[in-house]
Image (spheres, rainbow, N blue to C red):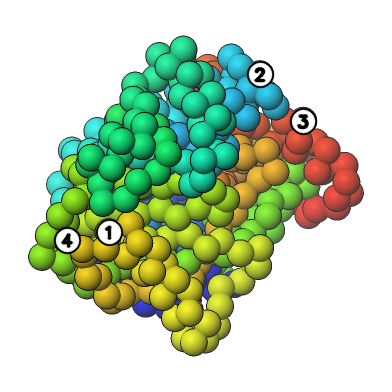
Amino acid sequence: MNLHYGSLYWPSTFPEHSTYPSLKGDKRTRVAIVGGGMSGVTCGYLLAKSGIDTVLLEQRQIASGSSSANTGLLQYLNDTMMTEFASSIGEERAATFYRACEDAAEKIGLIAENLRRDVWFNRRSSLYFASSPSDVPALEKEFDALRERGFAGDWWDGDRIAERFPFRREAAIVTRGDAEINPFRFVHAMAEEAADAGLSIFENTAMTSVERADSGEGYVVRTTEGDIKANHVVYAVGYTPENAGGKWIQASINRSYAIATAPLDGFSGWHERFLLWETARPYLYVRTTPDNRIVAGGLDESVRYPVLTGRELRARSMRLLSEVKKLFPELHPSVRYEWCASFGESADGLPWIGEDPDRPGQYYLLGYGGNGTIYSMIGAEIVRDRLLGYPNEIADIVRPDRPIGQAFGEAAGKGSSS
């Protein structure tokens, strides 16, 4: 399955990245991670740094799937508001989950700032603005709930927005503690240092099946190049959930669009290079890059596969460019890179992370939703803590067999079991 179509910006910023051999023969390890994108490499990084013997398999190249199409916004606010989560999972659990997202953003920052390579990490504030006046009451309710729980942020009215930007909206929440990153460089930089710490990485090695070991303990991960015997298997397979098997993951796979402009001379009127996004669904989001480009994305569509023609792609790219120009009429951006990519969502807005109750020792690490990079960190910590025997307060919230997952599984009534 092709996860993206078009010209990707991030790989162009790091053409000299490291490569890894394909698997040759059989191996034995404690943990086998299937997938070499953001989730898989973050997990491999944490496990290797914790001294856990781990092998990572990638069927193509590291960060060549959805990670190379990721637009690199790190925000603790979610596509689903905390007040909406409160209605479905309870106020306390909603706040706990949001706090985990905030903590994950900080932990990603600490990793990024200590990597040997520059991964273009910059701390930013975000402007989450009301797309229309009718969205203001819900946005204000969200702000009050965030403030009550101690999250850092400010309420901006229309005048304050207009004083700092060349556009006006009725209201916005400004959040602190967010950031931007180059996801392609970040994944590769983590992979390099994880390999130095003992992670075995094999590219161009596709998993063909996972079977219970003859001894009854652990599993055999069969690949095109050899077998790996492992006590635990982590499925970090991104937006191909069928590769994880099991019956619990019933995700909606859609597609979205993004552009990166040619470099600009400056960003007059763009207050502190805030990350911008809105309350409309689907929403527009906009950021800048260290080499003075604008990255914008949105126009989500309920179609699993990316577009297949340049004409289709260009039509959406021009729409995104038009939206950017409406926000910043004094800037004159032009499209340099454009792409369409698949992304996944769950019905309740939460990622699918944790041990499959039907297959002990097999774990899902699927960070579905707009906060995929944040979810990758949360998921990697859940897997690490489970293997080390530590409690994790988020694990129960995102577990595969949470109530919505159970309902999906019963409705589906099928799913491979390996």
- Bin the neighbour count of mark 2 within 10 Å (Cα to Cα): few under 14, some 14-19, many 20 and up: few
Q: Earlier in the sequence, mark 1 or mark 3?
A: 1
Write the residue at 24% across / 33% down.
110
Tell me the mark number nearer the camera, choosing from 1 and 3: 1
Tell me the mark number nearer the camera, choosing from 2 and 1: 1
> Which image quadrant is residue 151 in?
top left
Of residues 358 and 52, the one nearer the viewer is 358
Tell me residue 21's x, y (percent).
36, 67
Residue 87 visible to the viewer:
yes
Q: Earlier in the sequence, mark 1 or mark 4?
A: 4
Amino acid at pointer 2: Gly
> Which image quadrant is residue 9 in?
bottom left
Tell me residue 190's x, y (percent).
29, 48
Tell me the mark number nearer the camera, choosing from 3 and 2: 2
Q: Which residue is mark 1?
A: 328
Write the residue at 48% across / 60% down.
298
Q: Which residue is mark 4?
A: 292
- Bin the neighbour count of mark 1 within 10 Å (Cα to Cα): few under 14, some 14-19, many 20 and up: some
Q: Earlier in the sequence, mark 2 or mark 1?
A: 2
Residue 321 in the image: above or below residue 165: below
Circle 3: element type: helix
Q: CA distance from mark 1 to mark 3?
A: 44 Å
Tell me residue 33's x, y (percent).
50, 49
Q: Which residue is mark 2?
A: 90
Q: Which numbered disc covers residue 142?
A: none
Q: CA distance from mark 1 to mark 4?
A: 15 Å
Residue 309 vs residue 350: left or right? left
Amino acid at pointer 1: Phe
Write the residue at 56% across / 31% down.
138
Q: CA distance from mark 3 to mark 4?
A: 45 Å
